[in-house]
Image: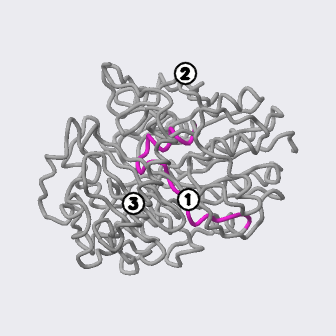
Amino acid sequence: MATDRPNILLITSDQQHYDTLGCVNQRIRTPCLDRLAEEGIRFERAYCPNPTCTPTRASIITGMYPSQHGAWSLGTKLFEDVPVVGDLFQAAGYATALIGKAHFQPVAGRPGMESLECQPIMRDLDFWRGFHGPWYGFEHVEVARNHTCESHAGQHYAIWMEENGLKNWRDYFDEWPHDREKMRLRHGRRHWELPEKFHYSRWTAERTIAHIQSSLAEGRPFLTWASFQDPHPPYVLCEPWASMYDPADMVPGRLAGDEHVRNPRHFRMTQEQSPDFSSYREDQGIHGFHSHLRDEQELRKDIAIYYGMISLMDQQIGRILEGLQRLGAAGDTLVLFTSDHGHFLGQHGLIAKGAFHYEDMIKVPMLVRWPGRVPAGRVSSELQSLLDLAPTFLAAAGLEIPGIMTGVDQLPSWRDGRQVRDHVIVENRHTFKNVHLRTYVDQRYKITVYRCDDDGELFDLAADPGEVSNLWHEPRAAELKCRLLAKFMQATLAAEPTRMPRIAGA
């Protein structure tokens, strides 16, 4: 059914490496996403504004940097008085919905930082039966916080499992409070006993299609976010997907010789058996600040499960796209697929995530399909930031972009290949002083600056795409470093906070 304004369908994964698409990596099978790439644009240089969940997800719906909207780290909260894009779409008559993972609020609620996404609220199904929004600009929400068999299972996903006959769903998830030994054994097996038909990726697809159908039945255009929870660890998966890939065929990334010798100290410490990161901590732990040494055979098994998660998710994304077609809405819908941040699978000797701004961590897959508005089958190297999604969606719908948004309208890039951005910025802040960094990336170079450290990183991405040779301390790169630092300063001044972030207890 044609609408006066386009429908917008945002599909995201969680913590997906940029090369885990079949169209660029022959070891993985993602036929539905490959077809989406053929029917639209695949962006080779899309970046997240922060390589952790809450900050980037908040940036997606605000169009602002984490340092501006206030949810600057995991464990912080996007407060509900921050302007969000969904409110603008609702005012224009759109049906807005979030289906899947939110993570706008901390898993551990505390005074001054109360959260709907923490225990024991997550397992209070009576609460969630009565709560479907409005929330952060979405008039309808159905959410789930867990990854694989984590104890955080509950919310609307658990209600769906019960309604579909799985009354004992708690048996398939870790206990709360945690039993560490049981968790270790279950996660080590990697095979999840949960029947595939109850997997949350199926739930996300089913409920996304339901919202699209109800919006169309009401004659309203929709802004729908299908927020998948995979392929975020732990590496646990149901059959047949857990056995889809042979670990022997997986190819882990590697540390290139002594590359970390030229990097800041915390990079080198990840390659120690029992590193002491205590000097980096203030009042909380830091993602990635631990030993990254991993047995290669175990890493291959992890990658096989990681790929299986993506293939299962791909199948369910295919269901959503088929639903759009069946409902007659595919031609009127702008579809964008991306991930909130990247992931390490051995690259540079690292695993999962952390304050290591290699491309593996900060670059994300991104596909855009909009029939008749953006060309099909194009591959673009133009710089994109997830910060730009909110303003670009507004522009696509013919709505005004508020001045508070720092992101830019990328429609000229999507439609005609015109350069909109000459740089992106990636923030990463885990503590007030010790781990507080920003990265500036332009068409060729990348520079990372630390708030309280004279060390840093500088890479020539054209000459050194593997980011092996850090030029920060190289005399031959001194002039280049000064030039990039000046650009970095100009860019960060333009991204100064527009509101003071709230601190718990303040």
In 3D space, how far apart are the residues under numbered discs 2 and 3 (Cα atoms)?
57 Å
Q: Nearer the viewer, residue 60 or 316?
A: 60
Label 1 residue SS: strand
| Marks 2 and 3 in Cβ contact (< 8 Å) | no
In the rendered image, residue 212, in percent from the top left (x then y), is placed at: 72, 41
Q: Amino acid at mark 3?
A: Cys
In the picture, the disc for residue 482 is 3
The magenta segment = 39-61
Q: Amino acid at mark 2?
A: Gly
In the picture, the disc for residue 5 is none
In 3D space, how far apart are the residues under numbered discs 2 and 1 (Cα atoms)?
38 Å
Task: Return the disc, 2 or 3, that comes first in the chain's sequence.
Answer: 2
Is 176 placed above or below 374 here?
above
Q: Which residue is mark 1?
A: 46
Q: Which residue is mark 2?
A: 130
Q: Nearer the viewer, residue 191 or 77?
A: 77
Residue 88 in which image quadrant = top right
Label 3 residue SS: helix
The residue at 44%/41% (across/down) is: 55
Q: Per the image, is 40 magenta?
A: yes
Q: Nearer the viewer, residue 18 or 400?
A: 400
Task: Return the disc, 1 or 3, that comes first in the chain's sequence.
Answer: 1
Q: Per the image, is 184 magenta?
A: no
In the rendered image, residue 168, in percent from the top left (x then y), is placed at: 40, 39
Would you say 297 lies left or right of 61 here? left
The residue at 50%/55% (across/down) is: 196
In the rendered image, residue 487, in percent from the top left (x then y), is placed at: 48, 54
Would you say 197 lies left or right of 370 here? left
